Image: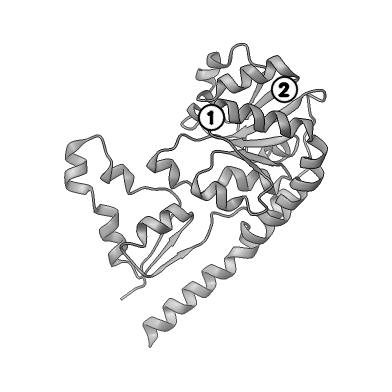
Amino acid sequence: KKNIILDYDDAAFHHYDKSNNSIIKKILHDKIYRLVQLADHVITGSPYLTEVLSAYTKNITEIPTSIDFEKYENAVVAENKNDDAFVIGWIGSKTTSKNMLDIKDAFIQLQQKGKFCLALIGFDKFQEDELNGINHILYKWDEATEVSLLKSFDAGIMPLTNTPFNNGKCGFKLVQYMASGLPTISTPLAANVKINRSGENKHATTVEEWVFAIESMAVQKEHYKNVVGKKNIEIAKEYYSIQSNYKKYLQLFSMLINKKNN
């Protein structure tokens, strides 16, 4: 008789319905979908998750993955070791490092055109050899320093291959960049396009588009920093912070409790 609420911020269902293991796919292809049908309510973090899971329930609410805005507001900017270069920032993990390597040709071309530096937080150090010839610096991820480092960059990027699983991602990197006052460039998947609420951040798919987007942002560095970056801070605060979105959770919980009691 308890309320069951499921919260998804990744396309976990694709681990089953699109598995390369035929046994898993056959037996568990509808595992998540059956759970969704049984739940009292489902919370999703991105448009793609909402679209897919809406086929299995009408009791669904989209609340984006949110940051603690106060953490970003109060962070001190880290020292920039590349004052004369346009710093392209990325934050991720070992498993997502591949996405950066998919567009490494863009960084090679950019380096031939001007002073650029690739700053990577959480990148897999065992794949660093793939970045040979590219001006870059690796930072070990640390919760205590991540925001200060992000604030020292000139732009934040989020390249992704267009796969069903990646379509379910909630664009959390972009939210982090925006809360840090950075303009962003990302692959135009559903969540990324929605997060670009001002329409002034850039999207890119091909290597050529990535080169053009980064280069044009570097040329208009002051505009993207002082205009677009500041707009991004306000967007992150209003739509993607726990300070704003906690109310949506409380309203949802209250509605479910009242419904159960009545």
Q: Give the residue at x 62% y 17%.
A: 108
Q: Give the residue at x 17% y 47%.
A: 27
Is residue 73 toward the left or the right of residue 119 in the image?
right
Mark 2 crowdedness (10 Å alpha carbons): few <14, some 14-19, many ≥20: many
Residue tagged by mark 1? 206
Position of residue 222 measured from the top left corner of the image (x, y, whole percent): 82, 38
Residue sitting at the far top: 133
Q: Quadrant of the C terminus?
A: bottom left
Specify the amino acid type for callout 2: Phe
Residue 74 visible in the shown view: no
Q: Give the residue at x 71% y 49%.
A: 72
Mark 1 crowdedness (10 Å alpha carbons): few <14, some 14-19, many ≥20: few
Of badges 2 and 1, the one in the foreground is 1
Residue tagged by mark 2? 116
Q: Give the residue at x 53% y 42%.
A: 188
Position of residue 104 measured from the top left corner of the image (x, y, whole percent): 56, 21
Using the image as rendered, state which of residue 108 and residue 130 is in the foreground.
108
